[in-house]
Amino acid sequence: MFGGVNLESLPSNFAPQSMSSSSIRFDNFLDRESSLGVLLMLPGLTILAIFLAYPFALGIWLSLTDTRIGMPGEFIGLWNYIDLLEDDIFHQTAWNTMVYALVTVPFKAVLGLGLALVLNNRIRFSNPIRAFIMLPWIVPTALSSLGWFMIFDPVFSPISWLMIQMGLVESNINFLGDQVLAVSAICWVNIWRGIPFFGISILAGLQAVPHELHEQAAIDGANKYHRFMNVTFPHIKGIIMITSLLSIIWTFADFQLIYILTKGGPANQTHIFGTYAYQVGMSATEIGMGAAITLYMFPILAFFSIFLLRYMKKSA
């Protein structure tokens, strides 16, 4: 007896039937692709909510306050954004960021495409060469930036030493102390780091192009240029667009490279959104203003994203 119920009077298959029906319902749930997809996505969505959505929402809230480090802030609405529109350094920062992205991304795309075309040919030691070419992308940004900092150093720069030996200049060049040279230096390092990413991504697309199409075009009398423009490029155009979009986002969000090389100098002339937000938010302790600076990136990135995605959709 249990709770007034005689357990011996229950059917012998009572428990197995209950468990069996539950198991069947669960199996049917897993058999549906949509349900299984949601179940598999839950851990990732939870991590995104904790480590991405919450900090983003907190950043939006902080940008609407006058919070400082160690001091609770008050809600001030859009005044941080309005004040930034009157900040000359912010104007220079926005211009620098646009130039930084619009100069480096096309160079990375073109040079990466050339690299992919070379690697797509049958050459000896192709695998070691591909691994070596990936080094700029694999090596941590902080480590490679320190190496370039020494290369551009006004005292120890091997570039300055070589140019002096060749009689091109009379004294060492302060690459990172001149505005034009500093902007050129950080753009060059960004291009150097980004070429492998474009090259390997486009190479994967090149190797997916059916050889039969090239053979048919060659039979029809098309030369290499026409085969590339009419056969190869339509197949890799989508990869180039997506890679360019990712590169634009990463370039806008760049921090380590510029902070190590110039820290936004000389005279705030190489700041981009990330470094200027750090200077205002952490060094000047104005957390609310720093958050507003970073959030100014999103309308610009949204514009680039919509433009590139619509272009891909039209050309598909």
Image (spheres, helix red, strand yellow):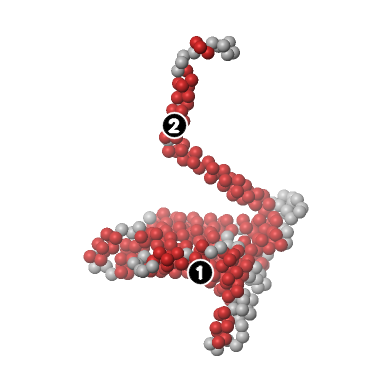
Query: From the image, which quarter does the C terminus lie in?
Result: bottom left
Closer to the camera in the image, 204 or 299: 204
Which x, y percent locates residue 172? Answer: 61, 83
Tell me how far mark 1 sits from mark 2, CA to CA. 52 Å
Closer to the camera in the image, 143 or 111: 143
Query: From the image, which quarter does the N terminus lie in?
Result: top right
Is 10 above or below relative to 83? above
Label 1 neighbour load within 10 Å: few <14, some 14-19, many 20+: some
Task: Tell me if I can see residue 265 in this picture.
Answer: yes
* Amino acid at pointer 2: Asp
Instruction: Give residue 3's quadrant in the image.
Output: top right
Horizontal side of residue 250 vs 260, given as left or right:
left
Which x, y percent locates residue 127? Answer: 40, 64
Is 152 above or below relative to 87? below
Is 224 above or below relative to 246? below
Instruction: Give residue 28's quadrant in the image.
Output: top left
Which x, y percent locates residue 92? Answer: 63, 68
Label 2 neighbour load within 10 Å: few <14, some 14-19, many 20+: few
* Amino acid at pointer 1: Trp
Closer to the camera in the image, 29 or 56: 29
Which x, y percent locates residue 182? Answer: 60, 74
Identify the residue at image location x=36%, y=69%. Answer: 124
Is 252 above or below relative to 155? above
Question: Disc 2 marks which residue?
Answer: 27
Instruction: Give residue 161's quadrant in the image.
Output: bottom right
Question: Disc 1 marks which residue?
Answer: 192
N-term mark: 1 or 2 = 2
Horizontal side of residue 292 vs 115, given as left or right:
right
> Looking at the image, how many numbered discs can be counted on the residues?
2
Q: Regarding mark 2 in the picture, which secondary structure is present there? A: helix
